[in-house]
Amino acid sequence: MSKEMTSNNRMGFIGRAFAVLGAATAAAAAVEGHRRPRARDLRTLGIDPANFPDTSRG
């Protein structure tokens, strides 16, 4: 494996990790605010938006 490929793989992993952390933060904030998280954030977290429960309670 070349040094360039290793560097690209590492940057891809780091970018993906930041995307997941950002999506998790946004989804948690939405749920705490009694709002539905964005479908994009749910998909990033591996959650099917159609199967995500409704956040309205009561």
Image (cartoon, grey):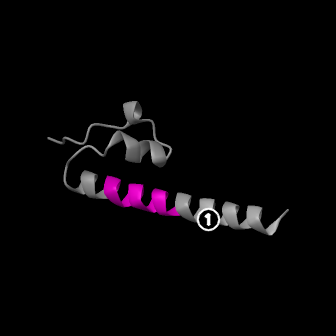
Instruction: Inspect the magenta stretch and tell me whether residue 22 lies in it.
Output: yes
Name the residue furthest right.
1
Q: Is residue 53 left or right of residue 21?
A: left
Name the residue beneath numbered marker 1.
11
Rendered-image quadrant of the C terminus: top left
**Can you tell which quarter of the image residue 13 is in?**
bottom right
Residue 35: image location, x then y, percent = 21, 46
Tell me, yes or no, whether the highlighted magenta stretch contains residue 32. Answer: no
Magenta-colored span: 17-27
Q: Secondary structure at mark 1?
A: helix
Find residue 43 and report its horizontal and vertical position in percent: 45, 42
Residue placed furthest toward the top:
50
Vertical order, 2 against 52 (above or below): below
Frontmost residue, 7 versus 43: 7
Q: Residue at x 36, y 39 (%)?
A: 39
Q: Main secondary structure of the magenta part?
A: helix
- Quadrant containing the N terminus is bottom right
Farthest left residue in view? 58
Q: Picture quarter containing residue 5?
A: bottom right
Query: Residue visible at 37% across and 37% down?
Result: 52
User: What residue is rendered at 19% in x and 54% in y?
Assistant: 33
Q: Residues within 10 Å of mark 1 (few under 14, many from 20)?
A: few
Left or right: 16 with respect to 21? Answer: right
Residue 48 falls in image quadrant: top left
Residue 27 vertical position relative to residue 13 in the rendered view, above or below = above
Label 1 is placed on what type of residue?
A: Met
Q: Nearer the viewer, residue 20 or 55?
A: 20
Residue 2: give x, y in percent of width and height: 83, 64
